[in-house]
């Protein structure tokens, strides 16, 4: 919880001060009573003492004062609500190393499944596009609110070629930068890029990520795979096993340059969880709701309760 006028909370020091005064006042009353009545005669002189009822109204008044001071400070609660408009590009590495099966059913298969998890959890108000990148980058589906089209576009992807991460970032940011809302303003955008290693083809990915960030398009990266990944490569008239370990450090640098966040995943479950988290992060915004009325109402209710108890039991308001 936050407050629009937090300085008013200083007044809360009045509550313990009043409590201290009340305790002292009650102690003085007890001493005065003891001065006129001997202990042996107390039960005869005052046989029906109010006990806890004497203090209940003051407890209610103290709580009411606390609630009213908090209300004066204008408390605010935070809630996540779907964004009115936005766009996200899902960029998938389909280079040869993505055929590795250290992540089941394969790195590419797990990536496609994670994309669909993202599509299932992102609000319908957010446009989503998809592209693949290998030796070059290719748009599979331009950003749209029809997320089924994006899911369909992910069919029949296969792994081949090299890795041009910079080209993918350039292409995605160029399209996102051109999107405009109904009022003509730039639509907030982001790039979610999944790969298993560094770029070995095309433009510099660090420079491309910096340029995207300068255009207010953050780049999030997910490194998918393990150190045990291998693929079969045809060499010298036979297939040989070639290691393709995941390289998260390169992707972490790209995310840092792109003002985004980097993630790592070693299995299909983890990468799907990351995409579910990103759908919530990118598809929602935090808004503040003032809850002053709730505290003010509680404070007034406590005042009425305290006054009612005092009138009922002692025939006076305080």
Image: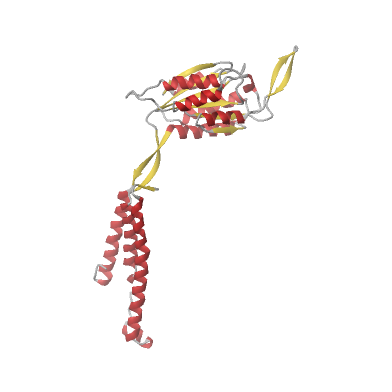
- Pinpoint residue 94: horizontal percent, then vertical percent: 58, 20
The quarter of the picture where residue 50 lies is: bottom left
Residue 190 appearing in the image: no
Q: How many marks?
A: 0
Q: Nearer the viewer, residue 153 or 187?
A: 187
Tell me the residue at 39%/47% (across/down): 2
211 on left or right of 247: left
185 on left or right of 240: left
Q: Is 147 drawn above or below residue 8 in the view shown?
A: above
Q: Is 47 drawn above or below residue 22 in the view shown?
A: below
- Pinpoint residue 206: horizontal percent, then vertical percent: 55, 25
Residue 166 appearing in the image: yes
Tell me the residue at 33%/23% (across/down): 184
Tell me the residue at 36%/59% (across/down): 12
State which quarter of the image contains the C terminus.
bottom left
Q: Is 251 drawn above or below residue 293 in the view shown?
A: above
Give the colouring mode of the picture.
Answer: secondary structure
- Pinpoint residue 277: horizontal percent, then vertical percent: 50, 35
Q: Nearer the viewer, residue 41 or 69?
A: 69
- Pinpoint residue 270: horizontal percent, then vertical percent: 58, 34
């Amino acid at each position: 919880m936050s407050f629009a006028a937090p300085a008013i909370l200083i007044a809360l020091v009045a509550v313990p001060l009043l409590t201290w005064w009340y305790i002292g006042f009650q102690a003085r009353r007890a001493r005065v009573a003891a001065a006129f009545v001997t202990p042996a005669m107390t039960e005869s002189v005052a046989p029906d003492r109010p006990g806890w009822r004497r203090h209940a109204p003051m407890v209610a008044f103290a709580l009411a004062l606390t609630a009213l001071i908090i209300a004066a400070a204008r408390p605010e609660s935070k809630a996540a609500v779907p964004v009115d408009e936005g766009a996200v590009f899902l960029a998938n590495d389909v280079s040869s190393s993505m055929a590795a099966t250290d992540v089941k059913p394969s790195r590419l298969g797990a990536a496609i499944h994670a994309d669909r998890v993202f599509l299932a959890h992102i609000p319908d108000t957010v446009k989503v596009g998809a592209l693949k990148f290998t030796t070059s980058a290719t748009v599979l589906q331009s950003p749209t609110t029809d997320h089924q089209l994006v899911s369909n576009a992910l069919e029949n992807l296969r792994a081949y070629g090299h890795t041009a991460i910079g080209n993918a970032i350039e292409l995605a940011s160029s399209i996102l930068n051109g999107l405009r809302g109904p009022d003509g303003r730039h639509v907030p955008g982001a790039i979610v890029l999944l790969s298993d290693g560094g770029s070995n083809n095309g433009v510099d990915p660090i420079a491309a990520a910096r340029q995207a960030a300068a255009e207010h398009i953050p780049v999030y990266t997910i490194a998918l795979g393990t150190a045990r990944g291998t693929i079969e490569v045809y060499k010298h008239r036979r297939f040989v096993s070639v290691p393709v370990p995941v390289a998260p450090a390169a992707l972490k640098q790209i995310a840092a340059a792109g003002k985004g966040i980097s993630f790592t995943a070693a299995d299909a479950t983890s990468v799907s969880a990351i995409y579910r988290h990103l759908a919530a992060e990118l598809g929602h915004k935090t808004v503040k709701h003032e809850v002053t009325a709730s505290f003010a109402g509680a404070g007034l209710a406590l005042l009425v309760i305290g006054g009612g108890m005092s009138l009922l039991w002692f025939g006076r308001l305080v």
